[in-house]
Amino acid sequence: MLARIFKPAKNAMQSGKAKTHVWQLEFAPKAPRVSDPLMGWTETTDTDGLIRLSFETRDEAIAYAVKRGIAFEVIPEPEHKLNIKAYADNFAFNRRQPWTH
C-alpha cells in the first residue's frame, strides 16, 4: 500500500489560499477503475482510495506513515510566485503590451 504526502494546490474557483495550509496523506489506487457496462459509470473495488487524512505539518504525516508501516512518497511543496500588479500599470507609458484599441 503506497501513499503520497502532499500539500494540496488551491482550487481554481478560489482566489485565496484557504484549505491549502494542511498536508494530506492519500493512498494510491490498488486496482484500476472499470466502466460499468449498463450505466457507464466508473467503479472500483479499492476503498483505500477514498481515504484522505489531513495533518498540520509534513512531519506529522510522515510520523503517522512510519508508525503504521505505510510506504510513502513525499511530494515537495510547490513554490508560490507572486505577481504583484497595480491598477495604474494599465495606463503606464512603458507598457509591455501596446494598446489594441
Image (cartoon, helix red, strand yellow):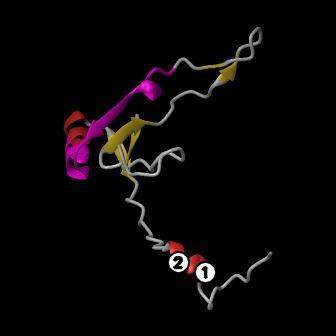
Give the answer, above or below, for where 75 lies relative to 36: below
In the rendered structure, are the residues bearing label 2 and label 1 in contact, judged by CB atoms less than 8 Å apart?
yes
Q: Which mark is residue 91?
A: 1
Distance between mark 2 and mark 1 Cα atoms: 6 Å
Crowd tier of the residue under label 2, counting other residues whose Cα lies within 10 Å: few below 14, some 14–19, many 20 or above: few
Give the answer, above or below, for where 71 lies relative to 98: above
Q: Position of residue 60 (x, y in %)?
A: 20, 45
Examine the structure image and report whether residue 59 is included in the region drawn in magenta.
yes
Left or right of 18? Residue 14 is right
As rendered, which of 62 and 80 lies closer to the eye?
Answer: 80
Which residue lies at the image location 25% right of the left edge and 41% below the top edge? 55
Q: Position of residue 81 (x, y in %)?
A: 45, 70
Which residue lies at the image location 26% right of the left edge and 51% below the top edge? 58
As rendered, which of 41 and 68 lies closer to the eye?
Answer: 41
Q: Which mark is residue 88?
A: 2
The amino acid on which the numbered mark 2 sits, given as a three-letter code, is: Ala
Q: Which mark is residue 76?
A: none
Give the answer, above or below, for where 30 lies relative to 59: above
Q: Position of residue 62 (x, y in %)?
A: 25, 47
The amino acid on which the numbered mark 1 sits, given as a three-letter code, is: Phe
